[in-house]
Amino acid sequence: MKEEFTTKTRRWYDQDPVLSSAMETLEESSDDTQIKIALNLIKIITEHNIEDSQYEEVSDIINATEVDLANQKRNRWYDLDETVRTAISMLQNCPNDTRHAIAVEMAKMVVEEIKKNEEDDEDELDEVEKRLDAEEN
């Protein structure tokens, strides 16, 4: 049976390749990294929405997000943590052009955080190796 090509996407964020890639990388990141990125996303989204006059106050953004969160299912990977869930919901509610701009920033943040974590892990390994060498001598 031949598979038909479709332009329909399964997830809302797969419509933007940059956002899709950033979300997949974020999903595979540690819980700490996800929370750090989510907090930064909330800040960035709030700034963008107020700059674009989408909302007048932060409380308007929060209220719009809370209504949306109440109506959503809780079986997605980003629903496990309230901070991540809120950030992703806020991102989903952004206009497409704003969402794309934020997606680019998000992708950079995810990559930077992963690199930082890898460097920290390498530093820890170096310390362990030094201690082991010191104990052997």
Image (cartoon, rainbow, N blue to C red):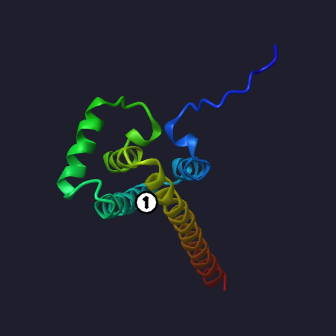
Instruction: Residue at 55% x, 50% y: name it.
Output: 19
Mark 1 falls on what kind of element? Answer: helix
Instruction: Residue at 54% x, 72% y: name it.
Output: 120
Quarter of the rendering occupied by the C terminus: bottom right
Instruction: Residue at 73% x, 27% y: name it.
Output: 5
Quarter of the rendering occupied by the N terminus: top right
Instruction: Residue at 31% x, 45% y: name it.
Output: 82
Image coords of residue 10 (percent x, y): 56, 30
In the rendered image of this protein, does residue 126 appear above or below residue 44?
Answer: below
Instruction: Give the residue pinned by disc 1.
Output: 37
Q: Amino acid at mark 1?
A: Ile
In the rendered image of this protein, does residue 114 appear above or below residue 137?
Answer: above
Image coords of residue 132 (percent x, y): 62, 77
**Res. 119 image quadrant:** bottom right
Image coords of residue 41 (percent x, y): 39, 59
In the rendered image of this protein, does residue 64 appear above or below residue 18?
Answer: above
